[in-house]
């Protein structure tokens, strides 16, 4: 083994000598760049870096490239949303492999949206992955931010987003399928438990649009639309009120699985059978729905894996020239279980 002084910071050249590779190969392996390096060679480099205690000098690299080596995750809230947690996990793992750190911004109001745009324009990160389901980050704000040249991937069904990659989810179609299932089971008083932001739009969109579309198709005029899907407590309280009313609904379609599971608890506490007295369907297909009692019927992705979404961002960051705007569609489906 080569001997090096412990008083000096190890260099990439020393790692290369110990691993018997070129300095360029060390750079490819430790930067996470997508270059063809044999698995055995990659392992030698990683072991040599570990033995020497070598880590790339991110500060120097950032100054040379005028980069921060950070990416930003923009969400509607901090914590509590299982899909956000999985998205964050996949982003952190890919960022770690490529020598980036992750900063997170929460956009839950117009003021927070303005603040987020300001810090992103100010260069807090080299790129952004944005998953904001409310209307606070408008199309104009997002398009204006993309026009600055910031590499961006936006999870949104909003039309007209320019200059960034867009990930779409056909929620309305899957939600309409769920409501049509309830109608086929003979349910006629179907309540929709919405997120707050869904109630303030000029016209229905996404999950609420799926609900109204299915009722329109089958000539059902009555609409029972309430808030309550934003958190478990609100969902339980809203479901309890609905189920105690003299003309209670015979089905509840909640805009989130967390709200639907709270509705199951509310029904059981009211002495009602699920699905005998009231059928319940959620949205999101989170794992918790598998162990609710009864198991939750839901709409959502078949699997929760956001590596394809995260890769879009790092493809942009590592491209020599900005690639054309891309669009991918992550399909949703209706999953029938015991609650309906």
Image: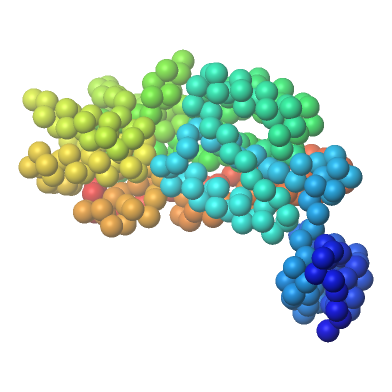
User: In the displayed image of the protein, which residue is found farthest to the top?
Assistant: 202
Visual colour scheme: rainbow
Horizontal and vertical percent for residue 234?
28, 31
165 in relation to 108, above or below: below
Horizontal and vertical percent for residue 308?
63, 52
Q: In which quadrant is the N terminus drawn?
A: bottom right
For residue 291, which quarter of the picture? Answer: bottom left
Q: Nearer the viewer, residue 211 or 240?
A: 240
Identify the residue at image location x=18%, y=47%: 275
Q: How many marks?
A: 0
Identify the residue at image location x=73%, y=54%: 99
Identify the residue at image location x=23%, y=29%: 238
Q: Nearer the viewer, residue 62 or 225?
A: 62
User: In the displayed image of the protein, which residue is found farthest to the front?
Assistant: 7
200 in relation to 209, above or below: above
Residue 173 in the figure: left or right of residue 64: left
Q: Nearer the viewer, residue 214 or 141?
A: 141
Horizontal and vertical percent for residue 5?
85, 71
Residue 225 in the figure: left or right of residue 41: left
User: In the displayed image of the protein, which residue is found farthest to the bottom?
Assistant: 1
For residue 49, which quarter of the picture? Answer: bottom right
Q: Tell me if residue 189 can be seen.
A: no
Q: Nearer the viewer, residue 285 or 203?
A: 285
Identify the residue at image location x=68%, y=23%: 118
Q: Tell me if residue 264 can be seen.
A: yes
Horizontal and vertical percent for residue 277?
12, 42
């Amino acid at each position: 083994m080569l001997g090096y002084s412990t008083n000096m910071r190890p260099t990439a050249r020393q790692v290369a000598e110990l691993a018997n590779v070129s300095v360029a190969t060390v750079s490819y392996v430790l930067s996470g760049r997508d270059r063809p390096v044999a698995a055995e060679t990659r392992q030698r480099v990683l072991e040599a870096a570990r033995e020497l205690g070598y880590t790339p000098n991110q500060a120097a690299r950032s100054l040379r490239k005028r980069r921060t080596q950070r990416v930003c995750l923009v969400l509607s809230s901090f914590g509590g949303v299982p899909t956000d947690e999985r998205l964050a996990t996949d982003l952190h793992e890919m960022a770690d492999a490529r020598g980036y750190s992750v900063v997170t911004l929460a956009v839950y109001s117009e003021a927070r949206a303005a603040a987020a745009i300001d810090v992103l324009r100010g260069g807090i990160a080299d790129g952004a992955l944005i998953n904001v389901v409310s209307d606070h980050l408008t199309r104009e704000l997002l398009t204006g931010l993309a026009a600055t040249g910031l590499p961006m991937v936006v999870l949104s069904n909003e039309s007209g987003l320019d200059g960034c990659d867009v990930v779409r989810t056909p929620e309305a179609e899957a939600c309409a399928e769920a409501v049509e299932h309830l109608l086929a089971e003979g349910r006629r008083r179907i309540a929709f438990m919405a997120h707050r932001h869904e109630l303030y739009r000029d016209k229905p969109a996404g999950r609420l649009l799926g609900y109204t579309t299915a009722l329109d198709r089958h000539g059902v005029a009555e609409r029972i639309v309430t808030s309550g899907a934003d958190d478990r407590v609100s969902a339980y309280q809203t479901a309890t009120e609905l189920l105690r009313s003299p003309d209670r609904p015979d089905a509840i379609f909640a805009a989130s699985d967390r709200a639907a599971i709270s509705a199951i608890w509310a029904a059981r506490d009211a002495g009602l059978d699920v699905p005998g007295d009231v059928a319940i369907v959620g949205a999101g297909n989170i794992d918790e729905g598998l162990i609710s009692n009864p198991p939750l019927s839901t709409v959502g992705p078949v699997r929760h894996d956001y590596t394809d979404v995260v890769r879009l961002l790092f493809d942009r960051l590592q491209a020599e020239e900005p690639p054309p705007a891309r669009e991918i569609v992550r399909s949703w489906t209706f999953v029938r279980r015991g609650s309906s």
